[in-house]
Image: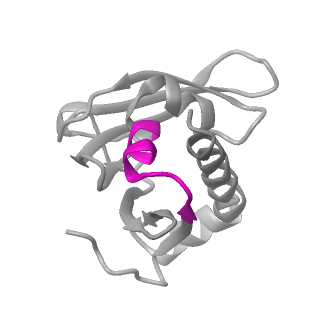
Amino acid sequence: MNRPFDPDRDLVITRIIKAPRRSVWQAWTEPAKLERWFLPAPSLCRVITLDLKPGGALLTEMSENGGAFLPHIDACILAADEDERFVFTDALTAGWRPGKEPFMTAVITMKDHAEGTDYTAHAMHKDPETRALHEKLGFHEGWGTVTEQLARLVEAGA
């Protein structure tokens, strides 16, 4: 079930991606593809674990400016509904363990559209202050950039 948008606590990016839902799903759920778009270039992403089941791990590392890889996301997958919805949170880690510094829950939805896929990335936060911090840290620029990178990847048939 998708939660309604709460303007006080949520941020959202939407886009029509001119590729089938299956392609968008695979870009989210195949580690080699996820690494190609999940961080704004030129940063690099490395997927350590992507266990597509409720309670499974989404664990990634990042490298900026060619430096060492450092922790990026340590999250728990809440739902992985093939070709439709991918939900993860850093409030939990794999195996439903509490996360160190809960920040958000992300709900990624993919719906059929006449031009391809109606894509939504919905970031939910515990309170307005956390939402404001995420926005200040560059949510729209960062998530907008990676959504553009995702679209370019799947629209090119990769």
- Which x, y percent locates residue 22? 37, 45
Rendered view: 27 above or below 78: above
Residue reaching furthest right?
Answer: 65
Q: Is residue 137 left or right of residue 88?
A: right
- Which x, y percent locates residue 157? 56, 37
Residue reaching furthest bottom?
Answer: 7
Residue 107: name its quadrant.
Answer: bottom left
Could you tell me which quadrant the N terminus lies in?
A: bottom left
Q: Is residue 79 left or right of residue 16?
A: left
Residue reaching furthest top?
Answer: 68
- Which x, y percent locates residue 46? 55, 22
Q: Magenta includes 45?
A: no
Residue reaching furthest front?
Answer: 114
- Which x, y percent locates residue 101? 43, 46
The residue depicted at 70 percent of the width and 52 percent of the height is: 145
The residue depicted at 56 percent of the width and 57 percent of the height is: 18
Residue 66: name its quadrant.
Answer: top right
Q: How many marks?
A: 0
Rendered view: 65 above or below 139: above
For the residue pair 122 and 22, the one nearer the viewer reads as 22
The segment highlighted magenta reads 16-27
Q: Magenta includes 20?
A: yes
The residue depicted at 56 percent of the width and 32 percent of the height is: 158
Q: Is residue 62 left or right of residue 95?
A: right
The residue depicted at 43 percent of the width and 40 percent of the height is: 28
For the residue pair 46 and 158, the one nearer the viewer reads as 158
- Colour scheme of the rendered structure: one colour
